[in-house]
């Protein structure tokens, strides 16, 4: 029983830690501080305002934003909550 409880607690802590930073999944393409041109095609998102970042992420979610990377980004932002989007904008935007 203790082993099962310990494994469950460990899995909960790991999943909580991985979602603590809403921007964590973005860093691979956009850079730690949003400084990269993702896959050679995106804007440098650290140069965008908080509002522009929120609008673009919401646009990707509802399919009204994006060009060549739209298909990829829709999948990346689909599960973001409004709080996640605001967190990303506050962390990266000007």
Image (cartoon, grey):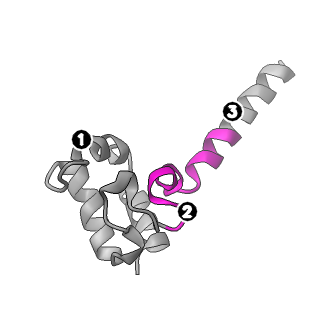
Place of residue 22 in the rendered image (x, y in percent of width and height, measured from the top left):
50, 56
Is 81 on the left-hand or right-hand side of 61?
Answer: right
Query: Would residue 50 be counted in the magenta stretch?
Result: no
Place of residue 91 in the rendered image (x, y in percent of width and height, measured from the top left):
49, 71
**Residue 11 badge:** 3
Q: Is residue 18 above or below residue 1?
A: below
Quick one: which residue is furthest to the top in this view?
Answer: 1
> Which residues, given as a range, are shown in magenta?
13-33
Mark before the other along the chain sequence, 3 or 1 = 3
Query: Would residue 22 be counted in the magenta stretch?
Result: yes
Tell me the quadrant of the picture where the N terminus can be found: top right
Q: Quadrant of residue 50?
A: bottom left
How far apart marks 1 and 2 lie (CA) works out to 23 Å
Q: Are marks 3 and 2 in contact (CB under 8 Å)?
A: no
In this view, the mark in front (3 or 2): 2
Q: Which residue is mark 2?
A: 32
Magenta-drawn stretch, dominant element (helix, strand or loop): helix
- Residue depicted at x 25% and y 62%: 56
In this view, the mark in front (3 or 1): 1
Q: Secondary structure at mark 3?
A: helix
Q: Secondary structure at mark 2?
A: loop
Tell me the quadrant of the picture where the C terminus can be found: bottom left
Quick one: which residue is furthest to the right in this view?
Answer: 2
Q: Are marks 3 and 1 in contact (CB under 8 Å)?
A: no
How far apart marks 3 and 2 lie (CA) works out to 25 Å
Q: Which residue is mark 1?
A: 71
């Amino acid at each position: 029983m203790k082993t099962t409880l310990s494994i469950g607690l460990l899995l909960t802590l790991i999943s909580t830690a991985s979602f603590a930073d809403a921007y964590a999944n973005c860093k691979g393409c956009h850079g730690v501080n949003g400084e990269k041109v993702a896959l050679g095609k995106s804007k440098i998102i650290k140069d965008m305002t908080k509002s522009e970042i929120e609008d673009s992420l919401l646009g990707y979610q509802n399919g009204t934003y994006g060009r060549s990377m739209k298909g990829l980004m829709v999948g990346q932002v689909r599960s973001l909550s409004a709080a996640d989007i605001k967190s990303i904008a506050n962390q990266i935007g000007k």
